[in-house]
Image (cartoon, rainbow, N blue to C red):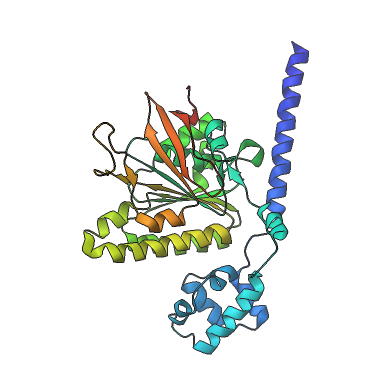
Amino acid sequence: MAAAMEQVKSRAAGARAEAEADEDVFMEEELPYSAIDQLQDKGINAADLKKLKDAGYHTSQSVAYSMKKDLLNIKGLSDQKVEKIMEAARKSSQSGFITCTQLVEKMKNRFRLSSGASKLDQMLGGGVESCTITELAGEFRCGKTQLCHSLAVMAQLPPNMGGANGKVVYIDTENSFRPERIQQIAEGRGVSAEAAMENIIVARCHNSEELGQLLIEAASLMISDDDRFALIIVDSIMGRFRVDYAGRGELSERQQKLGVALNKLKKMSEEFNVAVVLTNQVMADPGGGCAFMPSLPKPIGGHILAHASTTRVMLRKGRGEQRIAKVFDSPSLPESECIFEIFGGGVRNGSD
């Protein structure tokens, strides 16, 4: 018995040491972005840099990825100044052509977050990938928000446990975020509930215009905070747009505003090397079925959202607490589906 106890203790100590080593590697990893203050070394004065930060540009990448006309809208920046700032930002961010071999090396810095269910992770190619947008679409009560809560806890775990030692930005547009659920999942995963909640930055979003402002604030937080961030969640992306813009008369404006928000999220995922998870609502498609087969609901948001999302996953209800997830659009993953189950500790594999 004593020998068995010693063996258990030895394995636990080994796991802790491995987790600490992973954390050290993560913390020593080179930052994926260049703070905009570094442009001062390239001849950009501090007053102009402050104007950029006030407008929501906190990294050299955010400037390099922007349109010139957007920077010209910032009060106090002339055409000549904008040209100089953009040139300095491009040099600082090293944007431009690279070889495929260099790209492979660069992509090694990406990570994947576990959902908590190994079969779901396997279907996603190892988990939710950083530098990409993953869309979770489905009807009500199909597990979208539960998956988001689970990911918000898993992202904080060390890499050897499926996380990335990172904080989480959670934008709640439907008033569905529940701290008590975070506590349950954290306790189920054997981590401190207080620490888990402290590492999740939550904002309640009441309209689509506020969403844009919250993304600017999130970028500022991710620069100023000493700790790394691993995940941005928007639950749900279309909830406010669907209400703020009604009817066909406002459809064009809605899609333009949605495209701006999605473009900001995509840039942030690459600037800060974070995973972005969006939940999405669905709509009925009366003309999509036939007399013998009812039509399946389809995600809303149109082609704008479809093109912005890297991986699209459709969720539907199963038996009891079981849910079925299906990858229906991805540049690297085949169409496939799996069963997962919602329980007190988040999500886990479901029985076939």
Q: Between 36 and 337, which is closer to the camera in this rendering?
A: 337
Residue 192 visible at all: no
Residue that protrudes farthest toward the right in the picture: 3
Relative to 4, 192 lies left or right = left
Q: Is residue 14 above or below residue 169?
A: above
Q: Between 295 and 248, which is closer to the camera in this rendering?
A: 295
Relative to 166, 238 lies left or right = left
Quadrant housing the N terminus: top right
Residue at coordinates 53% horizontally, 41% vertically from top-left? Answer: 334
Q: Between 211 and 265, which is closer to the camera in this rendering?
A: 265
In the rendered image, residue 82, in percent from the top left (x then y), is placed at 53, 83
Residue that protrudes farthest toward the front in the picture: 291
Residue at coordinates 50% horizontally, 41% vertically from top-left? Answer: 151
Relative to 10, 270 lies left or right = left
In the rendered image, residue 63, in percent from the top left (x then y), is placed at 54, 73
Q: Is residue 347 above or below residue 335?
A: above
In the rendered image, residue 61, in percent from the top left (x then y), is placed at 58, 68
